Amino acid sequence: MMVEEINGRNGFLGRPVEYVLLDDQSKPDVARSLYEKLITVDKVDLIQGPYATAPILAAMGVAQRYGKVIIQSSMGIPKLQTYEMAFPATPFGPNPEQTYPNVILDAMASLPTPPKTIVILTSKFPSAQFMAQGMRTQSEKRGVKVLLYLEYESGNRDFGAIAARVKEANADFLWVGSLGLESNQVLEALRKLDYTPKNHFHLYPAPGPLALSPDGKNALCSTFLEPAEPFMSRPGVARQAAAYKERATKANLPYAIIDAQAAGMISEWQILEAGVNGAKSLDDKAIAAFLKKNTVDTIYGTLRFDGPYNHGNAEQLIKQAQGGQWKVVWPTKYAAPGVKLIGS
């Protein structure tokens, strides 16, 4: 989608962009080999980052060795982005383990009956574990008692015993450091025990299955953009959301609504295009120098790269599953008219 847009604007300084799909299988060693080949054998002009923290770290090492700019949208642990020519396309901010838990806790504190106790359940996947530890620290600082902190192996599918411990704790708030369908599996296991969490948050779930499941009613989740106001008023967002929905529907995706994951990839391309045009060059050092000194207008709004680890402001938002759809509910200035946070 973005390659077509960029080529419709005469590509990068007159050079057409070619779309070729390479599968890193979500394995860091495969990602490392692919980027090594792209740079040394295929001799590509520019590279983009892969998806997820571990493959990004692997690719970043290769980019650093050869002096290539690398832009990524899903590095969940910003402090690991130590390469000076690596840039984030998603506004996590430099310390999301501090800022994001407080966004969640602020939202919870706004409820008529704010949670006083919390259970933190997390995958051992590094970026989820990182955020869970931050959630525990910030909860304790704000006087929310952590009744249970429990980690499970990445890829676990049997949540029966874990669900029993969550039910026994019976906290006011359940925070789940989940990836993909793990959230659905956790909630299903709780339902089998006739237990519904009072308030529940999920870190990186599969958005469609969670929103559409009856178990996901009023689930909370992280986001940076949803296809509603005020986001749709940003330049180009309505067009991009419509194009994404059309293509996702044709591809028979079960959830054809643009969200933060898809938007992150759009942001990556917008930043690279701005860097090339701003530097008037395909030279990596020139592009990096431009990005460090300038802001870029993206689907996420205006981003800057002059802070720690090349991050700008933290712009995390909270969305909630309401009526089978995700609605941004916090901060309230980003909620669409009539949309409010629903508590237990």
Image (cartoon, grey):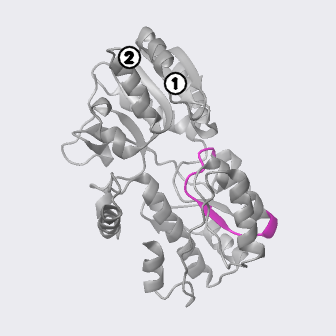
The residue wearing badge 2 is 172
Viewer-nearest residue: 81 or 195: 195
Residue, x 61% and y 36% (percent of image)? Answer: 125
Q: Is residue 276 above or below residue 78?
A: below
Whole-angstrom CA distance, mark 2 to mark 1, is 14 Å
Q: Nearer the viewer, residue 342 or 179?
A: 179
Residue at the extreme bottom: 14
- The crowd level at tag 2 (other Cα within 10 Å; few <14, some 14-19, many 20+) is many
Given the current orientation, which residue lies at the most extreme right position?
Answer: 65
- Residue nearest the viewer, comparing 77 with 164: 164
Q: Amino acid at mark 2?
A: Asp
**Residue under pointer 1:** 121
Crowding near the residue tagged with mark 1, few <14, some 14–19, many ≥20 C-alpha atoms within 10 Å: many
Q: Position of residue 97 (x, y in %)?
A: 58, 36
Q: Does residue 102 appear to the left or right of 67 in the view shown?
A: left
Q: Which residues are magenta?
A: 65-77
**In the rendering, at what x and y percent does residue 35 appear?**
71, 65
Q: Is residue 336 magenta?
A: no
Q: Is residue 73 magenta?
A: yes
